[in-house]
Amino acid sequence: MDFSHSTAGMRMRKTFKVLNRYMILMWRLGLGSWLKNKETWGQVLVIVHKGRKTGLKRYAPVNYAQVNGELYCAAAYGTRADWYRNLMANPEMEIWHPEGRWEGVAEDVSGSEDRVALMREVLIGSGFAARVFGLNPHALSDEELAKITQPYRLLHLRRVNALTGPGGPGDLAWIWPLTTVGLLWILLRRRRRR
């Protein structure tokens, strides 16, 4: 089901780009765990990687599955996905997961003998996104799933080293206390005027 060049596919890709900005902001505000709803948003983590042309830090929120303690995600737009191409050029990355933050390495495992089973888990973990693409991972046979997802790329996100400190998820969480103090100040001023 590769319709990424169709009008509907291009519109969907633009919509996902806007939604991705919102998800990244949620993570940076320290609210990434709020996106952990398998039925709605799906399971979301953020891959922080380096742009292959610019060398600049890039963020890609992706749906994922955790299978036997290992993380897997899929590039539904296949090799056209910028974040996928960036990771293939430089597989070292950072993983923002609801349970922690890690240095990691991405590996394309699309040729794995477990591809269909892993892809099914990723699609189940994607919540609404699979349905937007017209997929029901619970109802598709292995053969149907293999055929439909053939253009997708399956990635193993191997966690290498746990990280702590600045620069990770929640780097904008300081906004909450500042906003709260500002709102309290406004409310107190209004109360005094009355």
Image: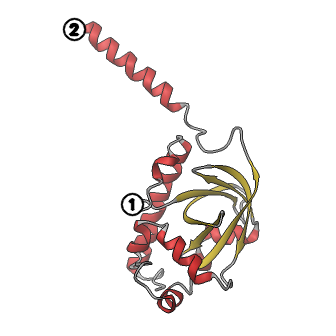
Determine the residue located farthest toward the front in the rendered image. Answer: 68
Which residue is nearer to you in this view: 29 or 33?
33
Total label count? Answer: 2
Circle nearer the viewer, 1 or 2: 1
Q: Residue at x 49, y 73 (%)?
A: 123
Residue type, numbered disc 1: Thr
The furthest residue to the left = 194
The image quadrant of residue 164 is: top right
Residue name at image x 45 percent, y 83 percent: 3
Mark number, residue 194? 2
Other-residue count near label 2 (Cα within 10 Å), few / some / many at <14 / 14–19 / ≥20:
few
Q: Give left or right: position of 105 versus 24.
A: right
Query: Horizontally, is 101 left or right of 74 in the view?
Result: right
The residue positioned 68% from the left and 83% from the top of the image is: 112
Report the colour scheme: secondary structure
Q: Secondary structure at mark 1?
A: loop
Mark 1 nearby-residue class (10 Å; few <14, some 14–19, many ≥20): few
- Is mark 1 in CB contact (under 8 Å) with mark 2? no
Residue 169 is situated, as x and y percent measured from the top left of the image, at 60, 44
Q: Quick check: 129 above or below 194?
A: below
Q: Position of residue 70 (x, y in %)?
A: 67, 65
Horizontal and vertical percent position of residue 89? 75, 70
Q: Quadrant of the C terminus?
A: top left
Disc 1: which residue: 40
Mark 2 is on which residue type? Arg
Sequence-wise, which precedes: disc 1 or disc 2?
1
Q: In the figure, 57 relative to 180: above or below?
A: below
Residue at point 57%, 57% (across, down):
45
Depth check: give the residue in front, 99 or 51.
99
Dot 2 lies on which element? loop
Q: Does residue 128 lie above or below 165 as drawn?
A: below
